Amino acid sequence: MNEVKNNTVLSGVQPSGDLHIGNYLGAIKNFVSMQNDYNCFFCIVDLHAITVKQDPNTLINNTLEVAASYIASGINPKKSVIFNQSSVPAHSELAWIFNCVTRMGWLNRMTQFKDKAGKDKENASSGLFIYPNLMAADILIYKATHVPVGNDQKQHLELTRDIAQKFNRDFNCENFFPIPEPIIDKNISRIMSLKDGNQKMSKSDPSEYSRISLLDESDEIIKKIKKAKTADNVMPEKIEKIINLSEVNNLLNIYSGFSGIEKQKLIEQYKGENFANFKSDLSDIIIEKMKPITAEIKKLMQDKSYLLQILLEGKNKANEVAQKTIKDVYDIVGLLRNET
Ligand code: AMP
Ligand code: TRP
C-alpha cells in the first residue's frame, strides 16, 4: 500500500478467558483484513475485563494469550499497534470525561449491562454500568473512524457515536471527534452456542461443549461438532427453512465463515442428507483453518518475553497518539494543564 492511510481502526478483545471461534470469525478475522488499508490499533481491554471478577493471577496470562491470538491469527505487529488498555492511561482519563457527557438514560438502555448484571443489578459493579463510556474512550482517543466488532457490540457503537456528537456539540468543537462506523460482517457477526442456537457463543458459558476455543486440538473440535445440536434429521432443501432452525443456521454460518462458500451453495451440497457428512466436512474445514493458528498461539505462549516486547512497543506507539488527544480534550473542556 503506497497511499497515505487516512482512516483509523480500533478494536478490542477482553482477556477474560480463552478466545473462541466466535471472537475469531466475528472480530479478529476482520482485524487482519483491515490492517493494510487503515492505521490499526488492536487493544487487549484488561480494564473492561475487571468490570466482572477476574483472578489477578490469571489476568496477566490471559492478556498475553489475547496478544498471542492476535499475532497467530495474522495481525502483524509491524503494521498494527498491539497493546493492553491499562498501559495507556489516557483511555481512563477520557472515559472520566465521557462519564460526564453520557446521560444516565442512555446507559440505562444498554442491553449488555442487563444481560451481564442479570437479576442482581444492585450487586453489579458500577464499572460494568459505565463500561460503554470506557469503550467510547478506547475508540475516540485514537479518533478511530472504523470499528470492526461482532453484532453484540452494535449498541455500544451507537452510544459511542452519540457521545462523540454530544461532545463536539457541547464544547463547540465540530469534527473534533469523528463519528465512527461499525464494521459488522452480516452472517458471522453472531456465532451462537453449539448447544443452544439462541445463545451467543461465549467465553463465560459453563459448558465447554458450547464453544470451540482457539486452543482446542483437532480431536476436541471433532468431538464438539459431533455433539453440536442440529434439531432436524436431514438438511432442509431451502434457505427459508434454515432461518427457523437456529442451530443448523449457526453451523452453516461457521462453515461459510471458515470456507468462504456461500450458505446457499452449502445447502445445495448437503440437502436431504443427514448431518453426519456435513459435520465431518465442517470439522475438517475448522481444523484446516485453526490448526496453524492454535499451534502458533501455543508456541508464542512459550516466548513471553517476545510478547512483552510487542506490547511494550505497542504501548509506546499508542501513548504517543493518545496523549495528544487527551491534551486537546483537557484544553477543550477547560481543565488546567500546568505544564512547561
Ligand atoms: P469479547 O470476547 O466480549 O471481548 O469480544 C471480542 C470481540 O468478539 C467483539 O468484537 C465481539 O463482538 C466479538 N464476539 C464475541 N462473541 C462473539 C460471537 N459469539 N459471535 C461473533 N462475534 C463475537
Ligand atoms: N466491549 C467489547 C466486548 O465486550 C470489547 C471492547 C472494549 C471493544 N473496547 C472496545 C470493542 C473498543 C471495540 C472497540 O466485546
Image (spheres, rainbow, N blue to C red):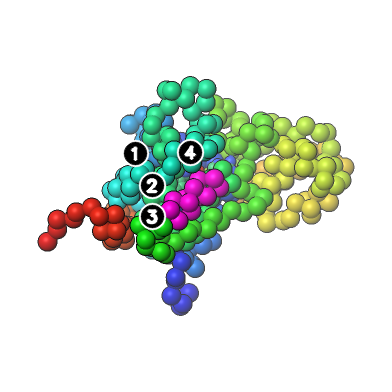
Circle 3: residue type: Asp
Counting residues from the N terminus, which is met first, the one under dot 1 or under dot 3? 1
Q: CA distance from mark 4 to mark 1?
A: 35 Å
Q: Nearer the viewer, mark 2 or mark 1?
A: 2
Please tell me which residue lies in front, 211 or 283.
211
Q: Residues within 10 Å of mark 3 (few under 14, many from 20)?
A: few
- Residue marked by disc 3: 170
Q: Are marks 1 and 3 in contact (CB under 8 Å)?
A: no
| Residue 267 horizontal/vertical position (percent) | 81, 49
- Residue marked by disc 1: 60
> What segment carries the magenta color?
154-166
- Residue marked by disc 2: 101
Q: Residues within 10 Å of mark 1 (few under 14, many from 20)?
A: few
Q: What's the residue at 73%, 37% (across, down)?
A: 246
Query: For numbered disc 4, what is the local secondary structure?
Result: helix
Q: Examine the rendered structure and indicate whether residue 292 appears above or below residue 143.
A: above
- The numbered dot on residue 105 is 4
Query: For numbered disc 2, what is the local secondary structure?
Result: loop
Q: CA distance from mark 1 to mark 3?
A: 39 Å
Query: For numbered disc 3, what is the local secondary structure?
Result: helix
| Residue 25 horizontal/vertical position (percent) | 58, 49
User: Does residue 145 appear in the picture of this structure?
Assistant: yes
Q: What's the residue at 36%, 29% (across, down)?
A: 55
Please tell me which residue lies in front, 335 or 316.
335
Q: Nearer the viewer, mark 3 or mark 2?
A: 3
Counting residues from the N terminus, which is met first, the one under dot 4 or under dot 3? 4
Q: Are marks 3 and 2 in contact (CB under 8 Å)?
A: yes
